[in-house]
Image (tube, rainbow, N blue to C red):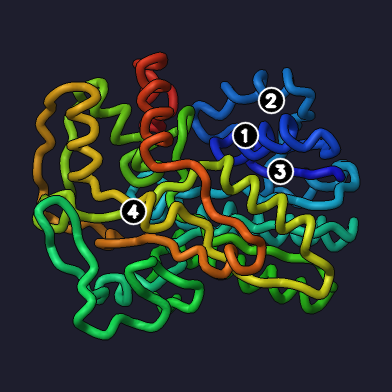
Amino acid sequence: MRLLITGVCGFVGSCLATCFCQRKPSFEVIGIDNFVRPGSETNRLALKSLGIAVRHGDVRNASDFENLPKVDWVIDAAANPSVLAGADGYTSSRQLVEHNLQGTLNVLEYCKRIEAGVVLLSTSRVYSIRALASLPLIAGPLTFEWDEDPTPPKGASRNGLDVDFSTAAPVSLYGSTKLASELVALEYRDAFSLPVCINRCGVMAGGGQFGTAEQGIFSYWIHAYAQKRPMKYIGFEGSGRQVRDALHPDDLAELIYRQIQHSGKTESQIFNAGGGPQNAMSLAQLTAWCAERFGEHTVQADSVPRPYDVPWVVMDNGRAAERFNWTPKRSLISILDEIANHAARNPHWLELCSAQ
């Protein structure tokens, strides 16, 4: 089995490549990356030392696929993953579309030509911001908690968001490019009989992640807290009650492995892949964990809302569990410990992976 991983030197791509190389010796892994993301070059030597062929390639350029070898599956992990991308005053909305939608189109054309399957890594941010804002939540001391009394929107429960939850606009510019990519991938599946699996991933987290304040929040928060950087809760009355769940790439790799083993050319579905309620935590709770690990540090409050912020996003993995007998194995505490240990070894990590 030969795999091509796009965005192979990003956090998720490099972790997936490492997992498949070390745990599935029958798999040959190759990858491409455009090395635009600050810090991504640091993963190149580590991957090459494992025998993984790493090439420079930009998914936005169709010609970069012309000389790639034939593979059995492509894992598309290349994207601009920030929910503020294209609307933050620093990044281009046109480039966002080129990265996340045009890039998917080029991947699909490559897969059509060589008759390969594709695993598209999508995001929880395809879900409707207005529907998320209307979830039945109670403001607890440190976190938004689920309220069982009101009837929740379709596809939502205390177990998280199901794939049937609303994707009605607005979902952010970033979310819209990923949702459009999903639709195009499904159309290629029907038109050209391509095997397609789409994973809507929650917050990916682990040691070595290039965290920022708007993407990779668990990694960013722990690194920033450990270095006693200025930090603040944004929106939601400056309370830090907003909740996310964390998924380690090792668990995602296991899901993808099972999907590849069981997906035939006539099958195609969309799955959620997140840490689930057992791996969910608010920013205020994460701060309390950091205080026990690193000592006290003041986090400022900024009640001004930020575009696209939502109070509660937890993924319901029920469909993936039923179809592939898959549930995440890595606990939230083990993920936080891994990030904290990485922060201790790499005190200047945020400077390395910051674009600012």
Task: Assess disc 2: are there few (<14), some (14-19) or many (≥20) residues with their C-alpha within 10 Å of its C-alpha.
Answer: many
Tag shown at residue 47:
2
Q: In what element is the residue under mark 3?
A: strand
Crowding at dot 1, Cα within 10 Å, few <14 / some 14-19 / many 20+, comes out as: many
Image marks 1 and 4: residues in contact by CB distance under 8 Å: no
17 left or right of 129?
A: right
Query: What residue sits right under mark 1 in the picture?
Result: 14
Q: Amino acid at mark 3?
A: Ile
- Quadrant hosting residue 64: top right
Residue under pointer 3: 5
Q: Earlier in the sequence, mark 4 or mark 3?
A: 3
Circle 4: residue type = Arg
Q: Percent from the top left, x then y, of residue 138?
A: 15, 67
Using the image, tell me which numbered label, if any, was put on residue 244.
4
Q: Locate residue 146: give its quadrant.
A: bottom left
Which is in the foreground here, disc 1 or disc 4? 4
Category of crowding for the residue at label 4, using alpha-carbon neighbours closer than 10 angstroms: few (below 14), some (14–19), many (at least 20):
many
